[in-house]
Image (spheres, rainbow, N blue to C red):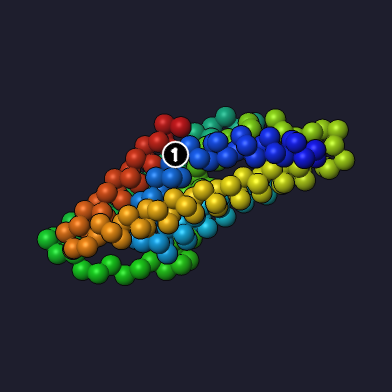
Amino acid sequence: MAPHTLLLFLGVDLLLVLTPGPDWLYIAARGLGQGRRAALLAVAGVCAGYAVHTALSSAGLAAALRAVPAALPALRWAGAAYLAVLAVTMLLGLRRTGGQLPPAPAQSTGTVLRQSMLTALLNPKGLLLYLSLVPQFVEPDSAVPVGGQVLALGSLNVLCCAAVYGAVAVTAARLGGSLAGTPVAARRLTAVSAVLLLLVAGATATA
């Protein structure tokens, strides 16, 4: 692939990743409600999900979804439902504690990674990136196979996501840490995090 093609894709992809969207909200919710560790693990999980999208696209499997009209709507609704379940679980946890907010046990690394990876895998916008944007930068006459080009472009997208979302995670965690000085404030931040997840679910459902 020509270097200018990679640079052009990098510029376009950065603009997309820098635009606040469902991924931003999801990672911000983790940072505000659960701190820096959970937020950075969420970034790792989201990037792992997009890495899977990259691998599937390079193998030609993602493009095959175009032949199944119901696949993307089903994926969209599954992703929205999953995020809604996470949000409702948080809100129910607050309701069960009543006026008291006991220290919440930190979720395990595997749990946060798994939930975040599923969020990315079930995000139709992430898949559409590989179905619509990436093919525009593939050079059929290049000495590099099409699958290799898709892999390179997808890897650039994952790196962009890691850098930008990492900054979002650290910023949200710092904000959450400065605001959660009392049990009442921590409770409110948890509620805000749940609402943000519901917003992400709504955005995913209407994508």
Identified at 60% across, 38% down, the residue is: 13
**Secondary structure at numbered mark 1:** loop
| Residue 77 visible in rendering | no
Report whether 193 appears left or right of 55: left
Depth order, front residue of 138/118: 138
For the N terminus, which image quadrant? top right
Residue type highlighted by circle 1: Pro
Q: Quarter of the image holding residue 112?
A: bottom left
Q: Tell me the residue that label 1 is attached to.
A: 20
Image location of residue 193, percent across then percent down? 31, 51
Q: Is residue 67 left or right of residue 186?
A: right
- The structure residue drawn at horizontal position 42% and vertical position 68%, both measured from the top left corner, is 108
Front-most of residues 190 and 173: 173
10 Å crowding of disc 1: few (<14), some (14-19), many (20+)? few
Is residue 113 visible in this depiction of the protein? yes
Residue at the left extreme?
A: 99
Left or right position of 179 against 55: left
Residue 132 placement (x, y as % from top left)? 63, 31
Q: Is residue 28 above or below residue 138?
A: below
Residue at image point 86% right, 33% down: 141
Relative height, residue 173 to residue 79 (above, below): below
x, y (%) of residue 38?
Answer: 41, 61
Q: How many numbered marks does the figure carry? A: 1
Q: Residue at x 58, y 47 (%)?
A: 160
x and y percentages locating residue 102 in the rendered image: 21, 68
